[in-house]
Structures are given as C-alpha cells and as structure tokens.
Amino acid sequence: MPRRSLPAEARLRPTTVASTLTVPTRPRTTHRPRRCPIATVAGSGSSTTQAQHFAESYVTEDLVLRTARSLAREVGLDAVTPGAGAALRLLAAAGNARAVVEIGTGTGVSGVWLLRGMRADGVLTTIDVEVEHQRIARRIFAEAGFAAGRTRIITGRALDVLPRLADGAYDLVFVDAEATGFHACVEAALRLLRPGGVLALNGVLASDRIGDPSARDAETVTVRETIKAVRESEHWIPALLPVGHGLLAAVKC
C-alpha cells in the first residue's frame, strides 16, 4: 500500500574542538549524491502496483470467503477485494458496531467481513434487488457460522427500503451500489447513522479514473461530485482509503 517516506537525517553541528582542526586539502572530485541504503533498497524494483498487491494479500481469506468470491464471479458480480473487506471488518470492530446497514448484498463477501468485525450480538441489515444473490448469501452466512438472527436480509431497491429504517439507529452504513445512487445513499446514511457512526462507500476510485481530469463520463463525474460533497460537508470527517476499488470512510459528526 502506498505512500510512506523516510524522515530526513538530522545534521550534526560541528563542535568547537572540531572547528579548530586542520583538514588536509585533497583534490576536488565530483561525487554522486549519497542515498540512504534503506531508501535505495525500498526504491529498487518496487511500484505502487506491487505495494497494493501486497496490501491486498496481507489479510488472507478462508474457504468460506473464497467460495463466496467464486460464486460472485459466476453470477457476474465484482465483490469487494480482500483489502477492502479487511478495512470494513476493521471499521466495524473499531466502532464496536451492533447495527450495520449494507446496500448491496451480493453473494455475501462483504457481509461476512462486516459480521466478523461486529459485536457478537450485532445484526447486519443487508439490501439487494436480486433474490438469487441473496439466496447464495444466506447460505454463505450460515457456512461462516452466523446464526440466522444475525442477519436481516431485505429484497428490494435500496432507495425504497432505506426510508423505512430508523433514524440514528445504526453504527455503520456500507454502500456497494451503482454510482448513480451514491448521492442518495450518502443522504440516507446521514439520517440513519448515530453521531460517531461510519459511512463506507465502495468504488470511489471509479476504475482508476477518479484522478484523471479528462475523465468526464457520467459515473466518474458522479463519484467525483459525491466524494467532494462529503469532503466539504460539515457533517462528515472523511478519508479516502486506496484499497480495492477505493473506499471512502467518513465519520458522522
């Protein structure tokens, strides 16, 4: 994972005694600047792609998650990556989450990661329009060892379901949906989350187009406008995590 730099070395002040010593003069030669050996090793043969690959493989997935991921590919879904999943588990655990909303059940990959970070008595409310995907996810949750009461699986459009959920009752809202619905989901999350609750928005790198000013397609523009609005809002304390397809995490003030 990117982006670490080494601190500059402190310069030593010459002592009074040292300043009185006479240093023999030598012919002046041109030397190449010296580099810190550690920096030299770290810089050779490394790249952002390699660092991201290492970060993604840092936390390994068990058979249940690998199965859920394989089933996602079979039905044409792009599940959250292991790195993004680990970040979701971290956010749920850090917030001691008891009530979580997931928009986009898929085959249960992100749901398992979230449940594994939540409290033992926590309940995941997960929403999706695809009944077949949710049927697979239900099996995956059971295989992962979660009792049926740990999940509330709702079939329907998120924007139809979210208004029926209670205000300020949730610790985390995870959005893994089409970019066209990002703005509405962020607005809903602001209502659903308690103060200190966390919003996690997946896919905010827009397939690596987010930093390209020339990318003006509808999806990229929508993502760009959404994350800008979150950054500039007084209601959120955000950070953009470069894991998976990009994860925007924001704490509700």
Image: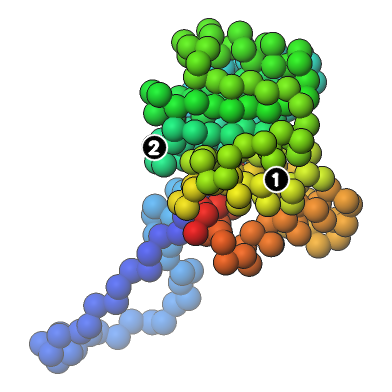
Asked if residue 161 is positioned above or below residue 21 in the image, the reply reads above
What residue is shown with label 2? 96
Asked if residue 239 is positioned above or below residue 143 in the image, the reply reads below
At which x and y percent is residue 87?
Answer: 51, 38
Q: Which mark is residue 185?
A: 1
**Colour theme:** rainbow
Seen from the viewer's position, the closer of residues 4 and 175 is 175
Seen from the viewer's position, the closer of residues 232 and 214 is 232
At which x and y percent is residue 178?
Answer: 78, 39
Question: In the shown orientation, is residue 154 left or right of residue 86?
Answer: right
Q: Which mark is residue 202?
A: none
Residue that extends furthest to the right in the rendered view of this protein: 217
Looking at the rendered structure, the kind of residue marked 2 is Asn
Taking the spot 74% from the left edge, 51% from the top edge, the residue there is: 183
At which x and y percent is residue 158?
Answer: 73, 35
Question: In the shown orientation, is residue 211 left or right of residue 151?
Answer: right
Q: Tell me the SS state at disc 1.
A: helix
Mark 1 burial class by Cα count in 10 Å: few <14, some 14-19, many 20+: many
Earlier in the chain: of badge 1 and badge 2, it is 2
Looking at the rendered structure, the kind of residue marked 1 is Cys
Asked if residue 138 is positioned above or below residue 37 in the image, the reply reads above
